[in-house]
Image (cartoon, rainbow, N blue to C red):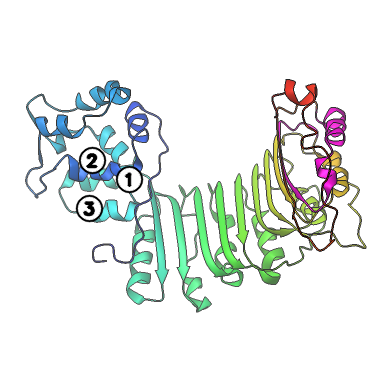
Amino acid sequence: MENGSYWNSLTFYSTKTTSYGTWLSSVNSSLIVENILTLLEIQIDEKDWTISMNEVQRKLSFDGLFEEKTIKFLNEFDQSMTCFENLSNELLCEIFDYLDGYQLFQTFSNLNSRFEQLIHSSCVLIKTRFCIYQSDKVLNTFEQFIFSNRHQIFSIYLNFVLQNSYLFSWYLFDSSFDRLESLLFKVTQSNKLMSMLNNLSSLPNLFSLTIETYSVKEQINDIYRLIFILPKLKYYRISSFNYYRSIILPIAMNNQFSPIEHLVINHYCSLNELQSLISYTPQLRRLTLHKTETNDLNVTILSSTITLANLQSISLDLCQTTFNELELFITKIFSNLKSLSIIGSRDISFLNAYRWKQLILNNFSQLEKFYLTYYDGINNNNQYPIYTGPVNQFSSSFWIQRKWI
């Protein structure tokens, strides 16, 4: 790969919280590599890398906020002259933690035996991103790098920019990716995901999965079925930008539960469908739904015995849902909420402060944060009533004491 022509810009991650990691994370991430490889003016050759201490002090002259942490960093250097190679392995690993994995290996491989051994050591976890085009060179590079370093891969962001779905059969993950914890797939069509998703259950430590696709079509049900059987998954986000597609999943049985704790749904979904989905996630702590679809007129909100005792935060965009539907849905399932965020529209009942007060007092005694956004149209062609009441009904002591206004 020449000059990273097929790669997106660097992505920076941090999984450690040592003093160096804290110092580096307090600096603008886009300057980290520049500070290390450019501003410090590291003179790179295969024999010796030297740094002038005066240059280091000049280039790292941060304001008083960073002074103490800067001193700790400078203590790694000799007071007059030092070699980059004299930095401890611990500090080097901290620096490597901010670099894209592929570019890290491109930069430090074959320099000398110490760096070769260090970048292949267990202390270096690889976080990388690939933009996959329909190019043999890119595909071969991806395959060679990923599989040769699969025991160090921590996170991967794959952006598939190709049309032929048969190419997706190449990208199958298995149990040999024993340190892989985070995956993000960005694809044009959901049917191209299926070959990869079928293999994800073999990953022993996959905790986070994000899927971005333009169209989910009828595959949406199969996608959820595959996601809910992943044994270690804690975070799941799915985004789709096409028209509504019905989700047909039965309420979960006792042996069908998923360990997901944070669920983000960014595709059209009715409250009935949402109720079916969360029946698979009894350990859920945070729930976000960005796009609600109107419930079928012939179907009422399902009666439910679902209990999400751990759920503390919920955010719902209800621009196509009435307050009555929300009330029926939310009072059946959520009892221990601490944060509630609602976006409403087309139903002025969302602006009824008394109804909200009664709903909260009767159902959410632990609620600490409440956010309400309501969108109203000046001219809606009489599709729904326009609010003409008081400017702010939410000005009583109930709202003031809780600091919600």
At x 89% / y 52%, what residue is drawn? 301
Q: Which residues are magenta?
A: 335-364
Residue 270, percent from left and from top: 78, 57
Q: CA distance from mark 2 to mark 1?
A: 9 Å
**The image quarter in which residue 286 lies:** top right
- Which callout, 2 or 1, points at the residue further toward the start of the chain? 1
User: Of the numbered discs in the image, which one, if any, rests on residue 180?
Assistant: none
At x 32% / y 47%, what residue is drawn? 99
Please tell me whether mark 2 sits on a helix, a strand or a loop: helix
Q: Is residue 98 visible?
A: no
Residue 288, percent from left and from top: 67, 46
Task: Name the amino acid type tagged 3.
Answer: Thr
Q: Is residue 84 visible?
A: yes
- Which callout, 3 or 2, points at the residue further toward the start of the chain? 2
Please tell me whether mark 3 sits on a helix, a strand or a loop: helix
Q: Is 90 placed left or right of 134 in the picture?
A: left
Q: Counting other residues with Cα less than 10 Å from the Cα at mark 3, is it few (<14), some (14-19), or many (20 or more)? A: few
Q: Counting other residues with Cα less than 10 Å from the Cα at mark 1, is it few (<14), some (14-19), or many (20 or more)? A: few
Q: CA distance from mark 3 to mark 1?
A: 18 Å
Residue under pointer 3: 107
Residue 62, percent from left and from top: 25, 29
Please tell me whether mark 1 sits on a helix, a strand or a loop: helix
Residue under pointer 2: 35
Looking at the picture, tell me which residue is in the foreground, 109 or 148: 109
Task: Name the amino acid type tagged 1.
Answer: Ser
Q: Nearer the viewer, mark 3 or mark 2?
A: 2
Contact, CB < 8 Å: mark 3 with mark 1? no
Residue under pointer 1: 30
